Image (cartoon, rainbow, N blue to C red):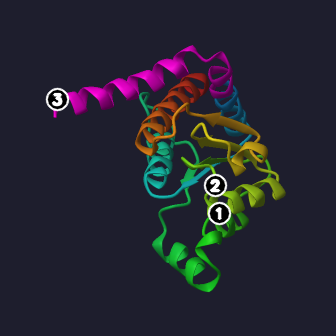
Amino acid sequence: MKNQIRNYISESLSVKEQLLNDEFILKKIEETVLLVENAYQNGKKILLAGNGGSAADAQHISTELVSRFIKERPALNALALTTNTSILTAIGNDYSNDYIFARQIEAFGSEGDVFIAISTSGNSTNIINSINTARDRGLKVVGLTGCSPCKMDNISDLLIKVPSNKTSIIQEAHIMIGHIICGLVEEALFS
């Protein structure tokens, strides 16, 4: 069992080391920080969505922005589109689960807002639909996904691809990237 534990930790560390040494990905994270910072400076908000563990990541990142990450500071406007069960179940029932996030972007999204779409596969239909709706409404789209070619590749304004095909490892990297974004945005706006 210890070998299995070591192997998992080693795989997770390897992916993070690849991120650490990939100038292209580091630049995409930096561009995301600047995009989010600019949105906040212009009175805009951040919307986030994902399915399953990625839904939890969307909620986690929005919580860090609204509550605080490290600094005592005013709340930042961020909304996880994964949390209102009445909205989710009504849209899922009346339309389809394929539109549970897209309909909310129609309701809550405005030009200049940033939509962070999280999908380990990059092919989730409801995420793809929400990206298309966000783009139609003038939101900037940041995609977080894994390394495989996917539908998000050509429709995200900024795309951060974690160099792994393993869902759990991708999710670990996504939350780390989310923490980096929250910390740098907080520092930029409230230093």
**Residue type highlighted by circle 2:** Asn
Left-right relation of 151 to 62? right
Which SS does the magenta portion mostly show?
helix
Ranked by sequence position, the earlier of labels 1 and 3 is 3
**Residue type highlighted by circle 3:** Lys
Residue bearing mark 3: 2
**Residue at 45% over, 45% down:** 167
Dot 3 alpha-carbon crowd within 10 angstroms: few under 14, some 14 to 19, many 20 or more: few
- Is disc 1 placed on a helix, strand or loop? helix
**Residue type highlighted by circle 1:** Thr
Query: Closer to the observer: label 3 or label 2?
Result: 3
How many angstroms separate mark 1 from mark 3 (CA)? 38 Å
Residue bearing mark 2: 123
Which residue extends farthest left?
1
Is disc 1 in contact with disc 2, using a CB cutoff of under 8 Å?
Answer: yes
> From which residue to which does the magenta span run?
1-29
Q: Is residue 114 visible?
A: no
Residue bearing mark 1: 125
